[in-house]
Image: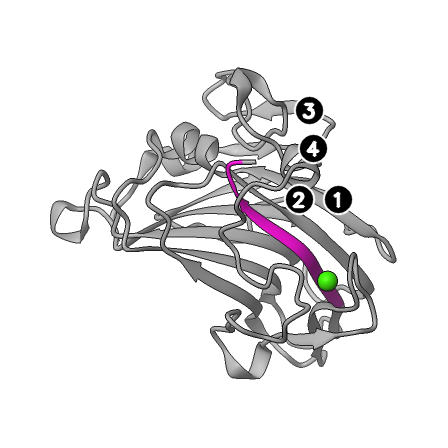
């Protein structure tokens, strides 16, 4: 693994949709527009327009009203279920149910994943999450949305000293510090707070701008785009306490708003 100096410079704070930018913090002392912010500068799209005047949603079954497909999990033991216990709209949502004992340690990810092959990087990822029964077993227990572009043609590949994929990791709630170092991923803080419980929380993530700002370009010519909606814990010490959560997602969207 090689050292990548750019990875230490991006710690950012983004507010939920509609609230704009509160704070930008970079170790280099720079002050730049926050790539995850939800302001609508430059005439770009927003989730509000997409919700009110539907434009193509690149996600299928985005409201979880047609069963599981084409959503997948990357780990059968920590996947999602379709739940009728809560729904932002319609009658169902996706539920990630974390029930891990105090003696669990290390890291565990609960996955709700869809892979798509758009020609260009979508401008936005939007949706709603809802957290209940939040019992924190690690400082780094959090809800997160991740976008992974595989083999973009305008980024260096492994032979060129680059990476097989490039990531933006949007920390939605639950952690106030980056959970780990990752050379091919950049973290964006949507909040640094604990998740609000018992209500649907909207999020609006400026995906294309985030790649542009944090990686220097929006990926082009990528093989696929993997979008992950997670609840997880990292750096858990055995005996620290149980890790529990019911994390629901509903009405997810990716596209240009
Ligand atoms: Ca639904």
Considering only order in the chain, which callout, 3 or 2, is on the residue closer to the N terminus? 3
Please, what secondary structure does the residue beneath circle 3 have? loop
Considering only order in the chain, which callout, 1 or 4, is on the residue closer to the N terminus? 4
Instruction: Please tell me how crowded label 1 is: few (under 14), some (14-19), or many (20+) other residues with Cα within 10 Å.
Output: some
The tag on residue 176 is 2
Quick check: marks 1 and 3 in contact, CB under 8 Å?
no
Q: How many marks?
A: 4
Q: Is residue 57 above or below residue 72?
A: above
The tag on residue 20 is 3
Considering only order in the chain, which callout, 3 or 1, is on the residue closer to the N terminus? 3
Quick check: marks 4 and 3 in contact, CB under 8 Å?
yes
The tag on residue 193 is 1
**CA gap, disc 1 and disc 2:** 7 Å
- Which segment did they paint magenta? 246-256
Is residue 9 visible in the rendered image? The answer is no
Residue shown at the point (63%, 32%) measured from the top left: 13
Query: Cβ of disc 3 within 8 Å of ligand 1?
Result: no
């Amino acid at each position: 693994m090689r050292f990548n100096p750019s990875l230490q410079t991006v710690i950012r704070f983004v507010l939920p949709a509609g609230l704009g930018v509160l704070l930008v913090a970079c170790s280099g002392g720079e002050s730049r527009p926050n790539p995850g912010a939800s302001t609508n500068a430059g005439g770009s799209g927003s989730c509000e327009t997409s919700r009110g005047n539907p434009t193509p949603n690149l996600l299928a079954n985005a409201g979880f009203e047609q069963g599981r497909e084409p959503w997948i999990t990357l780990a059968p033991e920590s996947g999602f279920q379709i739940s009728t216990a809560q729904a932002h709209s319609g009658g169902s949502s996706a539920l990630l149910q974390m029930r891990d004992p105090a003696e669990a340690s290390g890291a565990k990810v609960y996955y709700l994943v869809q892979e798509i092959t758009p020609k260009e990087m979508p401008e936005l990822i939007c949706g709603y999450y809802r957290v209940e029964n939040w019992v924190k077993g690690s400082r780094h227990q959090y809800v997160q949305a991740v976008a992974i572009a595989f083999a973009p043609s305008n980024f260096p590949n492994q032979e060129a000293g680059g990476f097989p994929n490039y990531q933006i990791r949007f920390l939605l709630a639950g952690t106030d510090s980056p959970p780990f170092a990752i050379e091919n991923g950049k973290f964006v803080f949507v909040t640094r707070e604990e998740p609000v419980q018992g209500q649907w929380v909207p999020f609006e993530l400026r995906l294309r701008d985030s790649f542009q700002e944090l990686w220097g370009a929006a990926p082009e010519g990528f093989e696929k785009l993997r979008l992950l909606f997670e609840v997880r814990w990292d750096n858990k010490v055995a005996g620290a306490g149980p890790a529990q959560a019911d994390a629901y997602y509903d009405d997810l969207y990716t596209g240009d708003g």
